[in-house]
């Protein structure tokens, strides 16, 4: 897992690296500048005119070093400096190194056209150590930079954006953010996307042992993490090895949700699948998913009872379920009688919101998968994304279960207070039915004996990865939920191809 550290921990990480590599701070800055320039030169050629706006701290020192290196690559570069109350030593060194090579203009006042002639605008005013909103010339400069039609790029973090707190005031709106070593927590929230744009990390060689020793509640999921979770199959395994899942889903007019979820359970590798559906779903289930066994409710339009539960490893429910009073009664009975983990989505979550006493019946180790509106119905409104994150952690702790809050960078909160942010997925997945597919994937993995947390981490990542593969093959615009199921085998193959089989 990629650890997400606080701004104070990042400062300590820099200091530790300088002391124990050992390396001079100016040389570490040089390494960071070169990593940024390597990223930049792969995407922008020498025909672009570039303005770099620098403060007088270490982020400004980065900007000066970047300017010098780009000039050495024959780019047309101009530097603007906004002086603060002090200058860091590394800023002073890089300013001296730049003299006579690149034009440096000190900003003492601003007019509307100051940044209008440039193709690329690089922000190096404030770094991750910022603790309060920009003021004065700094705020004015950021405002004018945001009005520019240039491509806007932030060095490490957009100026004005706080790494791990709520941000206010003027904030640089980057098209791209090139951040050093690891993402900042603020990058992973929807409210900050307009500031970070597309972000990526570049390795600058900060001390990895120090990073591993840092206490954090926040992690960013990588492919190698999923590779460690997934178990290779043994020659003598059989269908009983991989669990028997029950999926309670569907109602009149919503059988599509049940079918999507059921197909995903099977593609996730479950040994056996039984689907409990209303009578209206029997023919379509048997003809559409021949690999699933059918358990038929006595009601024609919706589920009113639960089957015998003893033989099932896990139960998933919610997709297309509906909220009829008899369905609510059956759902209550499920929570009372099935004391193993369950996967709850869609109408199962809506039933919980309207019948809050049922929250007490959720078995420990269950997985809840709300989208933001379903989550709001469960926990109430929030004022900002940090408060939303706190509510997610609190709900996971309260229920002793895993709470998966769906969206870009889907967050997975464990009962112990850790949060894992997903790194796969794309806007093409913002279409009906993709949540039903995720429910199926999670149900299928949980049935195979993976822990609830490992199930959520692997399932969310594979769901997004399948969507990414589908988007490349079909385009984001044309992507539908069935495509995610279709490309799920390719996602598994991509993750597991390095394992010995």
Image: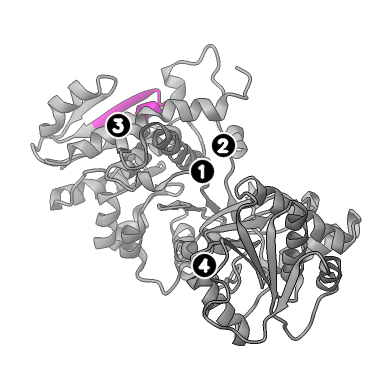
Which residue matches tag 3?
Answer: 262
Disc 2 element: helix
> Which one is nearer the viewer's eye here, 121 or 492?
121
Disc 4 element: loop
The alpha-carbon separation of the residues under discs 4 and 1 comes to 31 Å
Residue 151 in view: yes
Which residue matches tag 1?
Answer: 457
Residue 231 in view: no
| Vertical order, 161 against 42 (above or below) | below
Where, quadrant-wise, is the C terminus in this rendering? top right
Disc 3 element: helix
Task: Pinpoint residue 451: horizontal percent, then vertical percent.
Answer: 51, 39
At 15% across and 27% down in the image, what residue appears?
A: 284
Of the two numbered discs 3 and 1 on the same chain, state the one appearing first in sequence: 3
The alpha-carbon separation of the residues under discs 3 and 2 comes to 23 Å
At 52% across and 12% down in the image, what residue appears?
A: 236
Mark 1–mark 2 CB contact (< 8 Å): yes
Of the two numbered discs 3 and 4 on the same chain, state the one appearing first in sequence: 4
Of the two numbered discs 3 and 2 on the same chain, state the one appearing first in sequence: 2
| Vertical order, 32 against 428 (above or below) | below
The alpha-carbon separation of the residues under discs 3 and 1 comes to 20 Å
Label placed on residue 173: 4
The alpha-carbon separation of the residues under discs 4 and 2 comes to 33 Å
Mark 4–mark 1 CB contact (< 8 Å): no
The alpha-carbon separation of the residues under discs 1 and 2 comes to 8 Å
Q: Magenta stretch: give its range.
A: 265-275
Task: Pinpoint residue 415: horizontal percent, then vertical percent.
Answer: 51, 55
| Vertical order, 287 against 214 (above or below) | above
Label placed on residue 226: 2
The alpha-carbon separation of the residues under discs 3 and 4 comes to 42 Å
Taking 278 as reference, is 456 left or right?
right
At 31% across and 29% down in the image, what residue appears?
A: 263
């Amino acid at each position: 897992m990629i650890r997400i550290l606080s701004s104070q921990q990042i400062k300590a990480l820099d200091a530790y690296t300088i002391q124990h590599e050992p390396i001079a701070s100016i040389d570490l800055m040089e390494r960071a500048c070169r990593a940024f320039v390597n990223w930049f030169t792969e995407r922008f050629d020498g025909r672009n005119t570039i303005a770099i706006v620098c403060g007088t701290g270490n982020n400004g020192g980065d900007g000066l070093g970047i300017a010098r290196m780009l000039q050495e690559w024959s780019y047309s570069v101009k530097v603007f400096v906004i002086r603060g109350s002090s200058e860091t030593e590394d800023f002073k060194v890089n300013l001296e190194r730049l003299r006579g090579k690149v034009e440096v203009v000190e900003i003492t006042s601003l007019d509307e056209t100051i940044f209008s002639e440039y193709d690329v605008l690089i922000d190096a005013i404030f770094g991750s150590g910022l603790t309060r909103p920009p003021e004065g010339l700094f705020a004015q400069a950021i405002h004018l930079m945001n009005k520019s039609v240039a491509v806007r790029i932030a060095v490490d973090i957009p100026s004005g954006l706080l790494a791990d707190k709520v941000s206010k005031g003027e904030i640089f709106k980057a098209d791209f953010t090139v951040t050093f070593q690891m993402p900042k927590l603020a990058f992973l929230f929807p409210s900050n996307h307009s500031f970070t744009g597309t972000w990526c990390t570049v390795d600058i060689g900060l001390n990895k042992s120090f990073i591993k020793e840092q206490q954090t509640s926040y992690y960013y999921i990588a492919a190698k993490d999923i590779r460690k979770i997934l178990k290779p199959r043994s020659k003598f395994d059989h269908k009983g090895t991989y669990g028997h899942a029950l999926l309670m889903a569907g109602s009149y007019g919503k059988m599509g949700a049940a079918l999507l979820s059921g197909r995903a359970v099977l593609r996730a590798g479950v040994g056996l699948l039984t689907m409990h559906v209303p009578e209206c779903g029997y023919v379509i289930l048997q003809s559409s998913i021949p690999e699933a066994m059918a358990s038929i409710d006595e009601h024609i339009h919706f589920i009113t009872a639960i089957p015998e539960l003893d033989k099932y490893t896990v139960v998933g429910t919610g997709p297309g379920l509906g909220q009829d009073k008899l369905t609510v009664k059956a759902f209550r009975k499920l929570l009372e009688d099935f004391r193993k983990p369950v996967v709850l989505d869609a109408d199962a979550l809506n039933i919980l919101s309207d019948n809050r006493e049922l929250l007490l019946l959720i078995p420990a180790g269950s997985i809840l998968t709300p989208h933001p509106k379903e989550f709001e119905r469960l926990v109430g409104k929030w004022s900002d994304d940090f408060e939303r994150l706190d509510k997610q952690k609190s709900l996971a702790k309260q229920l002793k279960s895993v709470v998966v809050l769906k969206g870009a960078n889907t967050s997975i909160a464990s009962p112990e207070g850790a949060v894992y942010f997903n790194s796969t997925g794309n806007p093409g997945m913002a279409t009906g039915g993709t949540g039903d597919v995720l429910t199926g994937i999670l149900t299928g993995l949980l049935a195979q004996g993976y822990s609830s947390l490992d199930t959520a981490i692997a399932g969310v990542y594979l769901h997004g990865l399948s969507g990414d593969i589908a988007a490349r093959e079909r385009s984001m615009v044309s992507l539908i939920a069935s495509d995610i199921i279709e490309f799920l085998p390719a996602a598994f193959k991509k993750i597991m191809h390095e394992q010995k089989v």
